[in-house]
Amino acid sequence: MAWMLVLPVRRWIISPQVLADRLGLTPSDEVLELGCGPGYFSAEIARRVPAGHVHLADIQPEMLEKARARLTRAGCTNATFTVTDAAGLPYADASMDVAFLVTVLGEISDPAAALRELHRVLRPGGTLSITEAAGDPGLRDPAALDALLGPAGFERTATAGGRRAATSTYRRSQADHGEA
Ligand SMILES: C[S@@+](CC[C@H](N)C(=O)[O-])C[C@H]1O[C@@H](n2cnc3c(N)ncnc32)[C@H](O)[C@@H]1O
């Protein structure tokens, strides 16, 4: 189904530019895109962090290969591609400024483990952005997201968009949160 994720009509739901605007990036940010799929959003994010880096991660190697081809075509050189399960991210503690997921959380079999890992790899005060779109399997409304993310050490700082694609922005707590 990867082809559906890169259809131009997807801009009507949320475009890469709109998503990037919602991330509040600075040019030197280290950004983790968890569940990048075929990379529909990735090139735009890479362009917004010319002195930083985008770390694309997905559990499916085929998705990462599509994303790699897409970013190569777009001329992006500040990106790396890693096959990984969200429950065990191969990144150092506090190494990311921003992490984002678009229509991914509902697919992750162990969201609590994924959130523990996201908390570990984000720096204190770093940003976690979660975008959910109409029709997602496992779609959560903002209250359900808060119920999941609050106990995991994230505090909501913004909400953008609407029924088509809602982006919830959270700040990672300053304190460690039971990471190993
Ligand atoms: C619906 S697709 C969304 C892809 C992309 N974010 C987008 O919006 O175009 C969900 C992606 O999450 C990935 N995924 C699902 N479970 C995962 C996990 N446990 N760890 C990492 N990636 C996962 C899938 O392989 C898939 O590429």
Image: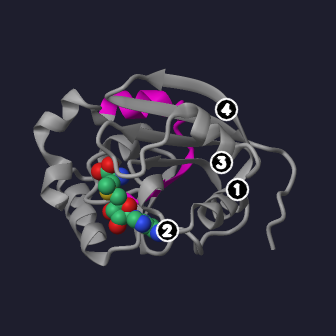
Q: Is residue 131 left or right of residue 75?
A: right
Helix, strand or loop at mark 3? helix
Helix, strand or loop at mark 1? helix
Helix, strand or loop at mark 2? loop
Counting residues from the N terminus, which is met first, the one under dot 3 or under dot 1? 1
Residue on which the image places disc 3: 148
Residue 146 x/y as whole percent: 65, 38
Residue under the point 68% across and 69% down:
92
The quadrant in which the C terminus is found is: bottom right
Asked whether residue 117 is drawn in magenta, I would say no
Over which residues does the magenta segment extend? Answer: 17-36
> Could you tell me the amino acid type at mark 3?
Leu
Disc 2: residue Cβ within 8 A of ligand 1's nearest atom: yes
Residue 4 x/y as whole percent: 15, 51
In the displayed structure, 60 sits above or below 145; it is below
Name the image quarter holding residue 56. bottom left
> Could you tell me the amino acid type at mark 4?
Arg
Residue on which the image places disc 2: 109
Residue 153 x/y as whole percent: 77, 48
Residue on which the image places disc 1: 119
> Could you tell me the amino acid type at mark 2?
Ser
Residue on which the image places disc 4: 156
**Circle 2 residues within 10 Å: few <14, some 14–19, many ≥20:** few
User: How many circles with numbers are drawn on the protein?
Assistant: 4
Q: Measure how far apart labels 2 and 4 are at the Cα level.
A: 23 Å
The quadrant in which the N terminus is found is: bottom left
Name the image quarter holding residue 168. top right
Disc 4: residue Cβ within 8 A of ligand 1's nearest atom: no
Q: Measure how far apart labels 3 and 1 are at the Cα level.
A: 13 Å
Q: Foreground mark, 3 or 1?
A: 3
Q: Is residue 49 visible?
A: no
